[in-house]
Amino acid sequence: MNIREVQKWHEEQVAECRSEDDEQSLQFHKDCVQALAEGVGLMPTYQYKCSKCGIEFEDNRSIHAEADTPRCDCGEAMNRVFNPTHTIWKTSK
Ligand SMILES: [Zn+2]
């Protein structure tokens, strides 16, 4: 994954958060776009929670695997919860 892909992804997320009126995530992705311009990559870590049993699960898969929602052992689809923790990586010049 290169910087352009990551930047594009965050820009898409900004647009998506705007349409969903998700202020918290919107600010996060805006910060990411800003950081990328300064050569610092920020990747969010996602957390999922089962609404039925309350089990939480941290997902460290790549952003490309985001499409499939993980399922809990009980069979319930897990909900993504905003997690402000992120992985920082230095982008090459
Ligand atoms: Zn469950």
Image: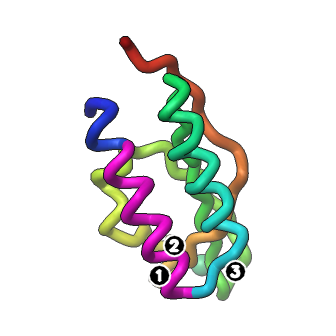
- Name the side, left or right, on which 72 lies relative to 93: right
| Residue with the mark numbered 1 | 77
Return the x and y of residue 55 as percentages of the image width and height: 69, 68
Sequence-wise, the earlier of marks 2 and 3 is 3
Give the CA distance from mark 2 to mark 3.
9 Å
Q: Nearer the viewer, residue 79 or 54?
A: 79
Quadrant housing the C terminus: top left
Question: Where on the picture, by quarter, is residue 16?
Answer: bottom left
Name the residue beneath numbered marker 2: 72
Q: Quadrant of residue 92?
A: top left
Question: Of discs 2 and 1, which sits in the foreground?
Answer: 1
On whether ligand 1 comes within 8 Å of the CB at mark 3, the answer is yes
Q: Let me know if residue 12 is in the magenta part.
A: yes
Instruction: State yes or no: discs 2 and 3 in contact (Cβ < 8 Å).
Output: yes
Q: From which residue to which does the magenta span run? A: 7-20
Q: CA distance from mark 2 to mark 1?
A: 6 Å
Identify the mark nearer the N-term, 3 or 1. Answer: 3
